[in-house]
Image (cartoon, helix red, strand yellow):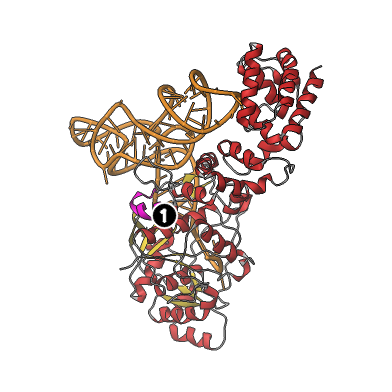
RNA sequence: GGUCCCAUCGUCUAAUGGUUAGGACAUCACCCUUUCACGGUGGUAAUAUGGGUUCGAAUCCCGUUGGGAUCACCA
């Protein structure tokens, strides 16, 4: 049977990392077996709907190359793919489940959380009195227009059992299971119910979701069984954590895909990194495109313990992707970050020296701020033991540098480097004793994208000479 | 609190009864170098804990500890 998986987000805001990773694994499980990946929007909670959220979902998936085979925008044989558009479809199944003895009508008021004297929530299992109402009587009340919900009926005793692809056999006592609402007063299904119906109707073979559903899965199985439908293969995923205690969450502004993009992370790097958060290929390679992953992904190598999201390793990996870019491609990506530099700056030359030096595009700004304006720097910057330079050396050599540079006709890196190198030889100095002071005079910074002559090329002749002049005056 | 799940370097992970417990990020040192990076080489660093089973345990079993999840007319 052809593998079919689905990504079923609710449109409640931006895409957070844990969500994206779930989508990725769903996509890969399907693609690794030549199966279909579907997109379904779960908007049964009208209160939480956020305008524009579905576009974020579409854009994110497209940007990272997770193309869906069926979905709200492109349709498919088992649509519609938005739950609110499927609304009328659920109630008949709910009523059918009542007939089959898997559910019952309930007329209780909405449950409110009870708190004890310390303000802690009292946890107790809900015993639904409506379960005992004879079906005929319940139907009469429904027919009379009394508001009702349909609640799952759980009469089984003993242990429920199922196998999860990553966690193995899970056994839970039926006693622990709550008789949850399936169809709400407003006629909408709850997530629990809509999921079962949709997954079955859409022919989903592998249900992939967070491990928080591990304890409630027996309830789903009960419904599949009562309807006489085959249970899907379950793949529960451990959470992505912010630290040892906390899950990465939408609240508290934890990194979302959009945040990372804004900071200059590449979609390819993000996908590569999160693929490895909870899965490994079994080899020592770790740089993979999504196409590579489609070939090698396997559920067997999924991990069951939570993984902490480590932005430092992501940053390193992003650097790898940046360095692997062609210089043209890097320039294209870097250009927006170079936009407010003076017009005389040779941005292409600058991009060339920047590429091996940044790990995110966002770092371009901080590395190039000195170009627009020479920062006010301390003379002590001229002191460097390894280069054997200090303020006196700088004082002596800067005027000579100025003279050489002002005579320079060819203003490119090789020519400038040759000129300064012969200056050092003529003066009996080490290269560093000329180049280090020149670099400081040009940038006013301890670390810079490139050496002295590279900076001179970027700044241009006029600005370079002006800055060296300024340095001479500063030290005088 | 009941139930379920998890536990290897700081982090991501490999090792499915026999390895000097491997790799990557981070960190440290050195080399390269026109600073800083990049690149190269090397180092520090882990099986939570106590019992079993076994010739042999990170690996299997039990307890302990620690952490997470779940118990909504949210998904």
Q: Is residue A179 magenta?
A: no
Q: Quadrant of the N terminus of chain A?
A: bottom left
Drawn side of residue A158 relative to residue A338, left or right: left
Location of residue A424 (image quadrant): top right
The answer to whether residue B15 is above or below residue A386 is below
Residue A317: image location, x then y, percent = 50, 42
Residue A102: image location, x then y, percent = 40, 75
Asked whether residue A177 appears in the rendered view, the answer is yes
Location of residue A465 (image quadrant): top right
Q: What residue range appears in magenta?
A: A291-303
Location of residue A357 (image quadrant): top right
Drawn side of residue A79 relative to residue A346, left or right: left
Residue A379: image location, x then y, percent = 75, 20
Drawn side of residue A121 relative to residue A217, left or right: right
Q: Which residue is mark 1?
A: A291
Q: Is residue A292 magenta?
A: yes
The residue sitting at the top extreme is A428
User: Residue A66 versus residue A386: which sits nearer the camera?
Assistant: A386
The residue shown at (69%, 14%) is A390
Q: Residues within 10 Å of mark 1 (few under 14, many from 20)?
A: few
The answer to whether residue A66 is above or below residue A359 is below
User: Residue A342 versus residue A244: which sits nearer the camera?
Assistant: A342
The answer to whether residue A287 is above or below residue A25 is above
The residue shown at (73%, 19%) is A398
What SS does tag 1 mark?
Answer: helix
Asked whether residue A444 appears in the rendered view, the answer is no
Residue A476: image location, x then y, percent = 82, 16
Magenta stretch: helix, strand or loop mostly: helix
> What chain letter is assigned to the residue under label 1?
A
């Amino acid at each position: 049977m052809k593998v079919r998986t689905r990504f079923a987000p609710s449109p409640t805001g931006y895409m957070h990392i844990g969500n994206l990773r779930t989508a990725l694994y769903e996509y890969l499980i399907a693609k690794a077996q030549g199966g279909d990946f579907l997109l379904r929007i779960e908007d049964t909670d009208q209160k939480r709907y956020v305008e524009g959220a579905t576009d974020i979902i579409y854009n994110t998936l497209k940007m990272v190359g997770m193309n869906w085979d069926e979905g709200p925008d492109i349709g498919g044989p088992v649509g519609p793919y938005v739950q609110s558009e499927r609304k009328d479809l659920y109630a008949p199944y709910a009523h059918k489940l009542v007939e089959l003895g898997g559910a019952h009508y309930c007329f209780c008021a909405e449950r409110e959380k009870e708190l004890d004297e310390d303000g802690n929530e009292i946890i107790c299992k809900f015993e639904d009195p409506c379960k005992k109402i004879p079906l005929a009587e319940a139907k009469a009340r429904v027919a009379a227009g009394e508001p009702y919900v349909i609640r799952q009926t759980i009469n089984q005793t003993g242990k429920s059992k199922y196998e999860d692809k990553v966690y193995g056999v899970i056994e839970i006592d039926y006693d622990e299971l709550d008789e949850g609402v399936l169809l709400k007063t407003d006629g909408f299904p709850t997530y629990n119910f809509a999921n079962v119906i949709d997954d079955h109707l859409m022919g989903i073979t592998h249900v992939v979701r967070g491990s928080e559903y591990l304890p409630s899965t027996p309830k789903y199985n009960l419904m599949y069984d009562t309807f006489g439908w085959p249970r899907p293969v379950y793949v529960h995923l451990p959470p992505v954590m912010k630290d040892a205690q906390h899950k990465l969450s939408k609240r508290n502004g934890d990194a979302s895909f959009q945040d990372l993009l804004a900071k200059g992370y590449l979609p390819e790097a993000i996908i590569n990194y999160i693929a490895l958060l909870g899965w490994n290929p079994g080899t020592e390679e770790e740089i993979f495109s999504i196409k590579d992953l489609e070939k090698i992904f396997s559920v067997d190598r999924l991990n069951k313990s939570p993984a902490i999201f480590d932005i430092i390793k992501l940053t390193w990996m992003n650097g790898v992707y940046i360095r692997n870019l062609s210089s043209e491609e890097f320039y294209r990506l870097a250009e927006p970050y170079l936009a407010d530099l003076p017009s005389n700056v040779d941005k292409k030359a600058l991009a060339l020296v920047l590429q091996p030096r940044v790990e995110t595009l966002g770092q371009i700004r901080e590395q190039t701020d000195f170009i627009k304006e020479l920062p006010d720097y301390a003379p002590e910057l001229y002191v460097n033991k390894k280069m054997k330079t200090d303020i006196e050396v700088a004082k002596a050599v800067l005027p000579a540098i100025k003279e050489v540079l002002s005579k320079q006709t060819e203003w490119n890196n090789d020519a400038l480097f040759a000129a300064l190198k012969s200056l050092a030889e003529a003066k009996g100095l080490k290269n560093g004793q000329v180049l280090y002071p020149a670099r400081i005079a040009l940038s006013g910074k301890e670390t810079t994208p490139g050496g002295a002559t590279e900076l001179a090329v970027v700044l241009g002749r006029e600005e370079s000479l002006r800055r060296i002049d300024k340095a001479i005056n500063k030290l005088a």
